[in-house]
Image (cartoon, grey):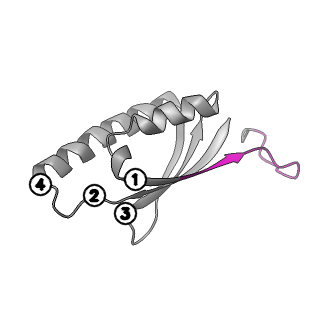
Amino acid sequence: MLFHVRMNVNLPLTMPAEQSAQLKRTERELSQRLQQEGKWRHLWRVAGQYANISIFDVASVDELHTLLTSLPLFPYMQIEVMALCRHPSSVRDGDF
């Protein structure tokens, strides 16, 4: 199942710099592993914002929920999820 996910990150201004840096390092490691596994298919930064648009390819809504809530930055995110399905006019056979 494909999902379009927008993640807006809002770290507290009072968070110590080292704590912020550690969270970001851990988040990067996990996101890169999930990308290599094919679960996090696309990751784009939203220009001018601390936000991203991602495409996830997972087996179920439950798997997506578990994956998102496991992200180190999850407590500081506002997340919007849209389920995707193949459009009948798409010419890209591999996008499903």
Label 1 crowd (10 A; few <14 / some 14-19 / many >=20): some
Secondary structure found at label 2: loop
Q: Of tags 1 and 3, which is closer to the observer?
A: 1
Name the residue type under label 1.
Met
The residue indicated by pointer 3 is: 50
Q: Position of residue 9 (x, y in %)?
A: 37, 57
Which mark lies nearer to you, 4 or 3? 4
Q: How far apart are marks 4 and 1 (CA)?
A: 18 Å
Q: Name the residue under label 4.
A: 16
| Nearer to us: label 3 or label 2 | 2
Instruction: Find out whether the residues at labels 4 and 1 contact each other: C-beta distance under 8 Å.
Output: no
- How much space separates mark 3 and mark 2, taking CA atoms? 9 Å
Regarding mark 3 in the picture, which secondary structure is present there? Answer: loop
First in residue order: circle 3 vs circle 2: 2
Mark 4–mark 3 Cα distance, whole angstroms, equals: 18 Å
Q: Mark 4 falls on what kind of element? A: loop
In terms of sequence position, does the residue under pointer 2 or pointer 4 come before the other?
2
Q: Which amino acid does label 2 sit on?
A: Leu
Q: Splitting the image into 4 quarters, where does residue 25 fall? A: top left
The residue pinned by badge 1 equals: 77
Residue 36 visible: yes
The residue beneath circle 2 is 11
